[in-house]
Amino acid sequence: MSSAFPEIYLVRHGETGWSASGRHTGRTDIPLTAKGEEAARGIVDRLTGLTFQAVWSSPSQRAFDTCRLAGFGEHVVKKPDLQEWDYGAYEGMTSNDILAGRPGWRLFRDGCPNGETAADVGARADAIIAGLRAVAGNVLIFSSAHFLRVLAARWVGLPPEGGTYLVLDTASLSVLGYEHDLTEPVIRRWNQK
């Protein structure tokens, strides 16, 4: 289902050792696993026939390698604002590890000590959205789960915390766009494998 309006294609990076084990991977540069590389190569088949005015990637190795393996590395622009949530003191920990020391903790509500809050990530997402609205055409973005969830929430006018309700699998494809005109941003597809 294509649209007469620009569409924003979001690709979460392929599997890494830390994503497979549920460890929060913000700024640690973890490579893709063999399974993640294979999934990244399969993304190109899901984008056949589409053209993009711009291809953007987080500077992380996992996002950029997913982009490159999907066949879009030649034209990509790395955007620092597309980096994953900075987990600060919780970097490399699982949610269960964090909950053991901080019962009731929720990332989108509580943020991370020495890291980012949802509002911090939301400000970066808003900067990306401003850039997207200046592009006349489709854009392809490679990034990480929590950032992309906040980006989608902000795209449709929700607070950054709204991303808590949008789960993303590795190597998934989602599409942001518009409904009747450019004043009606919507999520057109979500978390497709």
Image: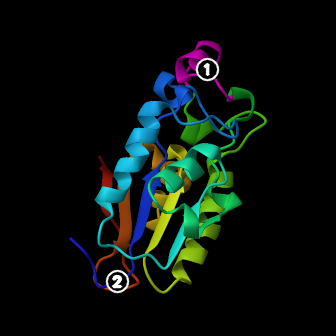
Tell me the quarter of the picture where residue 185 sits: bottom left
Q: Is residue 168 visible?
A: no
* Residue range of the region highlighted in magenta in the rendering: 91-104
Task: Compute the Cα span from label 1 to label 2.
Answer: 42 Å
Tell me the quarter of the picture where residue 187 sits: bottom left
Q: Which mark is residue 5?
A: 2
**The residue positioned farthest toward the top in the image shown:** 100
Q: Determine the residue positioned at 30% across, 57% down.
A: 45
User: SS for tag 2?
Assistant: loop
Mark 2 Cα-neighbour bin, 10 Å: few <14, some 14–19, many ≥20: some
Q: Is residue 10 visible?
A: yes
Classify 79 as above or below 31. below
**Amino acid type assigned to the residue bearing label 1 in the image:** Ile
- Find out whether residue 96 is within the magenta segment: yes
> Where's residue 162, x and y in %?
46, 51
**Amino acid type assigned to the residue bearing label 2 in the image:** Phe
Q: In front: mark 1 or mark 2?
A: 2
- Find out whether residue 145 is within the magenta segment: no
Q: Determine the residue positioned at 68% across, 38% down.
A: 29
Instruction: Give the labeled residue for mark 1.
Output: 98
Q: Is residue 167 left or right of residue 25?
A: left
